[in-house]
Image (tube, rainbow, N blue to C red):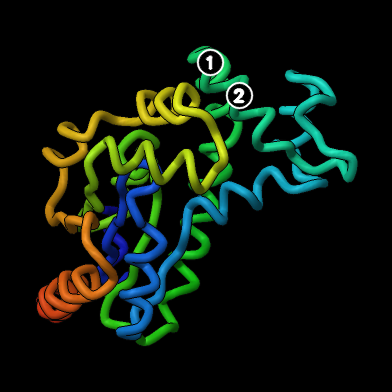
Amino acid sequence: MNTDEQRPLTIGVTGGIASGKSAVAQAFAALGIPWVDADDVAREVVAPGEPALAEIAERFGPEVLDAQGRLNRRALRAIVFADEGQRRWLESVTHPRIRQRLLERLEGMRASGAPYHLLVSPLLFESGQRELVDRCLVIDVPESLQMARTMQRDEVDEAQARAIIEAQMPRSKRLAMADDVIDNQGDRDALARQVAELDARYRGLATAHTSEQ
């Protein structure tokens, strides 16, 4: 994490696709903890009128835009997850812009009064956003469950779901980098119990974090 002493404790929340990061963030929110979602910011930086969208359309052509001039995510996803070079190029265009906006949003949460806050990001480790947080919470589910959830939620076939998962950090490596882990195979009650336990721990860490400043 950067050395800004006035910034409250920041917990990075990550996990593979369809692991349940948003559900975890909502459970923390029910306990009064705010969050910034890197996926929301990623959508903002490719909105109509944004420079990143113009660069993407110039590279991939009009087929990655819909009739309203917005990004056709399904068309772009089919391209970049079939070609690592194209995916790397896309990341080089979007990641710096996402990082800058995340910094601005985290700065804006200083006034929330919460003891700590969350940065929810699927690419916390891969994109270097790890540097923006004090502690990393990984939401973990087996790959078979990821596959099933991704195919149902995103209406993609098995091959595309597998390509997305394989493009992400391996589960074992993600777990090795975690400070804390939530097992999200169970129901909402099981998730809520784990979040409540972590919230108590993080509140204690936040107090210590403040006293060290």
Residue at 82% across, 46% down: 49
Contact, mark 1 vs mark 2 (Cβ under 8 Å): yes
Res. 201 mark: none
Is residue 184 toward the left or the right of residue 105 in the image?
Answer: left
Q: Mark 2 falls on what kind of element? A: helix
- Identify the residue at the far right of this view: 67
Q: Quadrant of the C terminus?
A: bottom left
Residue 45 spot, x, y in % from top left: 65, 47
* Disc 2: CA contacts within 10 A as few (<14), some (14-19) or many (>=20): some
What residue would you read off at disc 2? 78
The one nearer the camera, 130 or 177, is 177
Residue at 57% across, 40% down: 155
What residue would you read off at disc 1? 82
Q: Is residue 90 above or below residue 39?
A: above
Residue 170 spot, x, y in % from top left: 25, 29
Is residue 47 toward the left or the right of residue 94 in the image?
Answer: right
Residue 200 spot, x, y in % from top left: 13, 80
Name the quadrant containing residue 10: bottom left
- What kind of residue is marked 1? Ala
